[in-house]
Amino acid sequence: MGKVLVALLLGLMWKVAVEAAIELPEHLKGPAKILRNTCKAETNVSEDLIEQSKGGYLPEDKALQCYIECLFRTVGLYDDAGNIVFDDVYHIMPTEIKEKVDAVTAVCKTIHGSNKCETAWLTVRCYFDADPEHSMLP
């Protein structure tokens, strides 16, 4: 289940839209909602901050930083050294986002901050800066 959620996260973060956004399969809507609600409750981030991420806006907010860290931690995107890695889920990503993920992660890799929350936010901010039009948080 975790690796599928990672693919879901990536699909939502880089919603490559040719004519319309990637539609989340029905069987993943429940787990995605649980993930979102779990991390919202853990971090007390506001729905408004998450929604502001549409179109590439990622405000510098402690709760939002920890929300992103929670998403990554919950779906297992960290290696033992604390780097954000996609290797284990690359093979299950939707084809339409692989090229975009390759381009963005080649530029950004992991940007380490003073703590895990800041590291997650700095890294995702780099993704957003690299491609704001197709970026949003789940």
Image: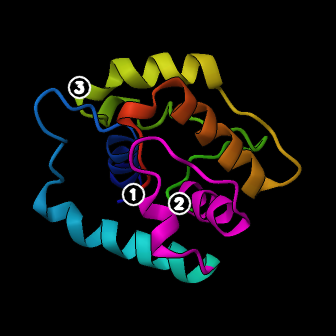
Q: CA distance from mark 1 to mark 3?
A: 19 Å
- Residue identified by numbered label 3: 95
Q: Secondary structure at mark 3?
A: helix
Spot occupied by residue 108 in the image (x, y as percentages of width and height): 63, 25
What kind of residue is marked 1? Pro
Nearer to the camera, 58 or 44: 58
Tag 2 or tag 1, which sits nearer the N-term? 2
Crowd band around label 2 with a 10 angstrom C-alpha radius: few (<14), some (14–19), many (20+): many
Look at mark 1 in the image and give the residue it sits on.
138
Nearer to the camera, 126 or 3: 126
Q: Is residue 84 visible?
A: no
Q: Which mark is residue 71?
A: 2
Label 1 and label 2: CA atoms lie apart by 9 Å
Is the residue 75 above or below the residue 89 in the image? Answer: below
- Mark 3, Cα crowd under 10 Å, few <14 / some 14-19 / many 20+, is few
- Magenta-highlighted residues: 44-73
Residue 71 lies in magenta, yes or no? yes
Residue at 27% over, 31% down:
16
Q: Position of residue 73 (x, y in %)?
A: 60, 58
Residue 35: give x, y in percent of width and height.
42, 70
